[in-house]
Image: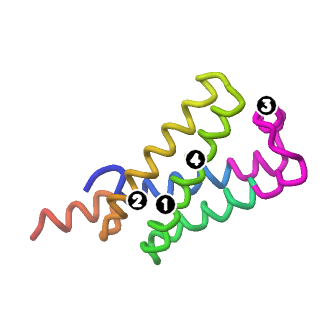
C-alpha cells in the first residue's frame, strides 16, 4: 500500500478541497485575485466552489464507495489539467502554475492505482502482519 492509495490520504485531500471550496465561495481576496488573473468570468465563478465541494464529497466517499472516489480522482485529474491549461493561456507565473501541475499528477497517480481495499492506518497494517 502506498501513501497515494491509503484511504486517510483521500480523507485529507477531501478536507483540503472542502476548505478550498469555502475559500472560493467567500471568496478570499487572494482567490478572487487569482480568478481575475486567470480571466474566469464572474458569471461562472459560482461553479468553482460547487465543483470543489462535490469532489470533496467524492473523495470522502472512499470509505463506503471506493469506486466513486476513484472516479472523483479521474475528474480531478481533468480539472487540474484544465487549470494548468488556463494558467498557461494567461501566462501566469510559474509559482502559480506549480500547484496545478502537482495536483494533476497526484490525482492521475491516484486514479491509476485506485484506493487500497483496507481501511488504512496502523490497524489495517497490523491486520495484514498477523496473517
**In the image, which disc is placed on residue 80?**
4
Residue 101 pos. (x, y %):
51, 37
Q: Is residue 70 left or right of residue 3?
A: right
Q: Residues within 10 Å of mark 1 (few under 14, many from 20)?
A: some
Toward the bottom, the furthest residue is: 64
Q: Is residue 122 magenta?
A: no
The quadrant of the image that shows the N terminus is bottom left
Total numbered circles? 4
Question: Looking at the rendered structure, which numbered label has been put on residue 74?
Answer: 1
Q: Secondary structure at mark 2?
A: helix
Mark positioned earlier in the residue sequence (4 or 2): 4
| Label 3 element class | helix
Q: CA distance from mark 1 to mark 2?
A: 6 Å
| N-term-proximal mark, 2 vs 3 | 3
Q: Name the residue rendered at 51%, 43% in the picture.
A: 103
- Between the residue at mark 4 and the residue at mark 2, the CA separation in whole angstroms equals 13 Å
Residue 73 shown left or right of residue 17 in the figure? left
| Residue with the mark numbered 2 | 111
Q: Secondary structure at mark 1?
A: helix
Residue located beneath label 3 in the image: 37
Quadrant of residue 120 in the image? Answer: bottom left
Residue at x-position 48% and y-position 38%: 102
Spatial CA distance of label 1 from label 3 is 26 Å
- Vertical comparison of 119 with 44: above or below: below
Disc with the residue nearer the chain's start (4 vs 1): 1
- Name the residue at the right extreme: 43
Quadrant assignment, res 46 = bottom right
Amino acid at each position: 500500500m502506498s501513501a497515494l492509495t491509503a484511504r486517510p490520504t483521500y480523507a485529507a485531500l477531501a478536507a483540503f478541497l472542502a476548505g478550498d471550496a469555502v475559500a472560493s465561495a467567500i471568496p478570499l481576496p487572494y482567490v478572487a485575485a487569482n480568478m481575475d488573473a486567470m480571466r474566469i468570468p464572474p458569471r461562472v465563478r459560482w461553479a468553482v466552489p460547487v465543483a470543489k465541494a462535490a469532489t470533496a464529497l467524492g473523495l470522502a466517499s472512499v470509505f463506503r464507495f471506493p469506486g466513486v472516489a476513484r472516479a472523483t480522482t479521474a475528474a480531478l485529474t481533468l480539472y487540474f489539467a484544465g487549470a494548468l491549461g488556463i494558467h498557461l493561456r494567461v501566462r501566469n507565473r510559474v509559482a502559480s502554475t506549480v500547484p496545478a501541475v502537482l495536483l494533476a499528477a497526484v490525482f492521475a497517480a491516484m486514479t491509476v492505482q485506485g484506493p487500497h481495499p483496507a481501511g488504512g492506518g496502523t490497524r489495517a497494517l497490523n491486520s495484514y502482519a498477523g496473517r
